[in-house]
Amino acid sequence: MNTRKWKKVLISAVAVLSISLLVVGCGKKNSANKAKKGEAVELTFWNGFTASDGEILKGIVDDFNKTNDKKITIKMDVMSWANFNEKLPTAITSKTAPDFVAMNYGDLANYVANGALQSVDDFWKYDGVDKDNFTKTSISLGAIDGKQWFIPMQVQGMYTFWNKDLFKAAGLDPETPPKTWEELAQIAPKLTNSSKNVSGFVFNKDGSAPLYNWILANGGSLVNADYTKSTFASPQTLEVLKTIQKLIHVEKTGPESIGGAEMDNLMNAGTLAIELNGPWLNNGLKANEINYGVTTLVQGNSGKQTAILDGVGYAIPSSTDKSKKDAIYEFLKYWNSTEIGKKWSTLNGFPAYLNSVNEDADVKANPIVAELSKQMVYAKPFLPGFDKLSTINNDVINPLIEKLTAGENPEKLMNDADKAINDILKG
């Protein structure tokens, strides 16, 4: 699902404002919608799984509808994540929102800050739910200020994908991808062959996720611990910005301005040697019969392993009648069973977050899932509860990347961004 990138699913300022002004009116739906014990229950469910993973999700939902003994039927509405975040705030305020949604971690803090979601703390007490089967980091993705706001659906991060045939054509070992950012910067020019339209490495113009991973690995940061001051301007950040500019603008390892979908298209066409992306890229590469490898994200030179943990969780809008919670929790329990967790991970190539799935023999034997799961040991959520991140990405970081790869002065860009971030934090 190419559009499911952290930077692609941000709530617009207008939508956030609409929640702030109107969410106080989001009481219970009228009694006609309430579920009574023993009666059939219909649930509405919105999500943005528009690609091959959406077909897998539909199959799982259909199976639940057929097999559950609680007379629960889920009606699913699938749309792009951008459309999802345009429609959901307004739907919540008008009491026409779905009963539950799949929500990206990068959007969660905005909705919570504006009172648009119900706490799901009580899910852990629901009959048959074993909280200890969830990895602690997967739980932490949906937790803000000591409360649980979404229940894990999937976890992910950024990973290193490489085209083995292009490595071999460049005289490099096809079984040895770069392990550090420094190695990536050294070999990307060697993999570039403009006469054959082969790019060694590209940097997504909306690439806040790889940029933050790179800065963290280099010892830098975006804001201080209490989210009150920018720490973006630093020698560590400047070194990263200069390296990116050297690769893209000077050594021309790939197009200067390229979006996520275009980047994926190059990889799926066999004309991009290295891509940093999420596990959703796996199915496209398989479908296009690309001879590729995937491993954990390249690291810094300090020896300390760092990676940002991202994910999607199930959340309940504030407008959903509480009488429907048990039916929603029944599906969430079903989703978080070993059987379904195993199916989702192995069919999609995603790391698992349930201990019982990680311990399954078939999952351990799956080379992609086993490799990507290694990163889950040390990956951590990025700035949990920070509700200004989407604004910073949209207004500051993404424009910086475009200007950086076009050749503008990296130090000036960094300092200007630092000031702009501080202005946002004060606002």
Image (cartoon, grey):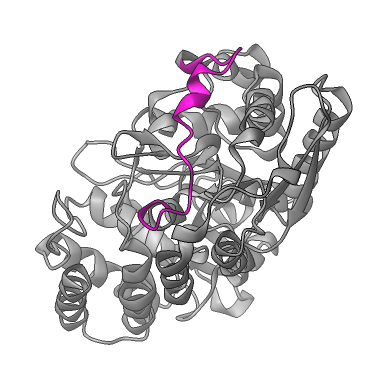
Q: Is residue 61 above or below residue 227?
A: above
- Locate residue 256 relative to residue 356 in the image: left or right: left
Q: Quadrant of residue 313?
A: top right
**In the figure, 195 relative to 268: above or below?**
below
Quadrant where the C terminus sits is: bottom left
Residue 129 lies within the magenta run: yes
The percent coordinates of residue 145 (x first, y second) are 28, 39
For the residue pair 157 and 64, the one nearer the viewer reads as 64
Residue closer to the observer: 292 or 88: 88
Residue 216 in sight: yes
Q: Is residue 117 above or below residue 403?
A: above
* Residue at x 62%, y 67% (from the top left corner): 87
Up-down: is 214 above or below 146? below
Numbered-mark total: 0
| Residue 227 placement (x, y as % from top left) | 18, 56
Percent position of residue 50, x then y: 72, 57
Name which quarter of the figure residue 67 lies in.
top right
Q: Residue at x 83, y 19 (%)?
A: 69
- Please report the bounds of the magenta region as a residue range: 112-131
Task: Give the left or right position of residue 7, taking residue 49 as reference.
Answer: left
Q: Is residue 51 left or right of residue 65?
A: left
* Residue at image coords 52%, 25%: 123
For this rendering, which residue is in front, 106 or 128? 128
Q: Residue furthest right?
A: 66
Q: Is residue 422 magenta?
A: no
The x and y percentages for residue 61 are 79, 36
In the image: residue 68, left or right of residue 149:
right
Q: Is residue 286 visible?
A: no
Q: Residue at x 31, y 57 (%)?
A: 212
Q: Quadrant of the N terminus?
A: bottom right
